[in-house]
Amino acid sequence: MSIRNTALAALAGTVLFLPVTSLADPFTVTDVAGREVAFDGPVERVVLGEGRLVYALAAIETENPFAHVVAWRNDLNTTDLTGFNNYLAAFPEAADIPFLGNLTDGTLQAETVVDLAPDVMLLTIGSKKAADEVKLEEMLSQVGVQLVYVDFREHIIDNTKPSLRVLGQLFDKSERAEEIIAFWDEQTARVTDVLAQANPEKPVVFMYRAAGLGDCCGSFGTDNYGKMVEMAGGINLGAEFLPGYTGTINPEQVIASNPQIIVVTGSDWTNSPSTSADGPSYVNVGPNAAATADASRVALAALMEQPAFTDAQAVQSGKVYAIWHQFYASPYQFAPIQQMAKWFHPDLFANLDPDATFREFHERFLPVPYQPGYWLALNEE
């Protein structure tokens, strides 16, 4: 019997003497892949198959989101360097947690996970195909390691709340998960209820995904930022051309569609392998980016000099904006929905303050301080 199983056996013996509400009560979660996964009690050792799962975990395990993490994928510091540094400043011990590779590109070996002896490995639903191909579930189940899928990216309406509830169950924080969900519902309704009553004319919006990290023009289909555009009262241009939640549109199609509003996604991609050796061509928005807003506007203006955009009515009318890319991998969708609603329908949402909303969320649910800079307009407002 392994050390881990020995510990579980000992714990099982203790359960007999605990009250019904004991933390060691067995439970079953239904993950976003529809799999029922049984546990003997709250998890103690967790592997994060994606580093950006910290965005959700931090709202659940606010006191210390790394308390039970024994390894995590090395992607937070390449996609959100400022955020990564903020979490390391708040929890220095996180710097000693081993990094893992990526299942989808073959840099993660199942044997590495087995050696860590976790109770559970959390994966995003986007990794399931790769996990199935290498038979990861079968391999881990043979040594008592459970696999659970969550999703804050591919189907944000269907899966964000179930994913939060799964995390709440795993860490014995179900009440906390419900508080986050209630906040999400309340803040999103401040937009959707107004739009349902006013029924305003909707502008055509082009979401330029990870602008500056690659060739033009990445965008979003019917989900993720595409869904958030719809919920904010816009018509997502990408939904017409992209069957999945993300993909690429030809620049010629953007020109022909002549969007009324352009929103690019940006982040602190200082450590991204896709960053140009000649210097950043992306727009830095995200935590603490307000301090460098002038440089971000210069980068945004340069992106609009590409042939796809120069004659677009959005550029001609000055309706060009940037928003934090990593909202697309978090349960914080209420914040970009509020901000985009202000851009799309300024008269309807003149009194809405998304900055105050996201600040309140940080103060109530997150262990890192709020640092403004998650969005900006090309023309300073």
Image (spheres, helix red, strand yellow):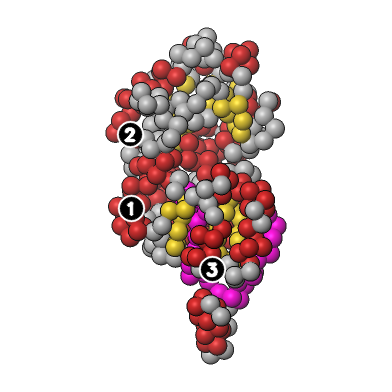
At mark 1, the secondary structure is: helix
The answer to whether residue 162 is seen in the rendering is: no
Quick one: label 3 or label 1, which is nearer the N terminus?
Answer: 1
Q: Residue 10's spot in the image, x, y percent?
A: 52, 85
Q: Which residue is mark 2?
A: 290
- Quadrant hosting residue 223: top right
Work out how far the residue at label 3 is from the one at label 2, CA to CA, in angstroms.
40 Å
Of badges 2 and 1, the one in the foreground is: 1
Q: Residue 266's spot in the image, x, y percent?
A: 44, 32
Magenta-tinted stretch: 26-55
Q: Residue 165's spot in the image, x, y percent?
A: 58, 60
Magenta stretch contains residue 47: yes
Magenta stretch contains residue 43: yes
- Amino acid type indicated by mark 1: Leu
In the picture provided, is 274 more to the left or to the right than 133?
Answer: left
The extreme bottom residue here reads 17
At mark 3, the secondary structure is: loop
Q: Residue 357's spot in the image, x, y percent?
A: 43, 44
Work out how far the residue at label 3 is from the one at label 1, CA to CA, in angstroms.
24 Å
Q: Judge the density around disc 3: few (<14), some (14-19), many (≥20) Cα neighbours within 10 Å.
A: many
Q: Which residue is mark 3?
A: 119
Rendered position, 167 above or below 319 = below
- Amino acid type indicated by mark 2: Ala
Of badges 3 and 1, the one in the foreground is: 3
- Quadrant hosting residue 373: top left
Residue at 48 percent across and 20 percent down: it is 319
- Amino acid type indicated by mark 3: Asp
Depth check: give the residue in front, 19 or 219.
Answer: 219
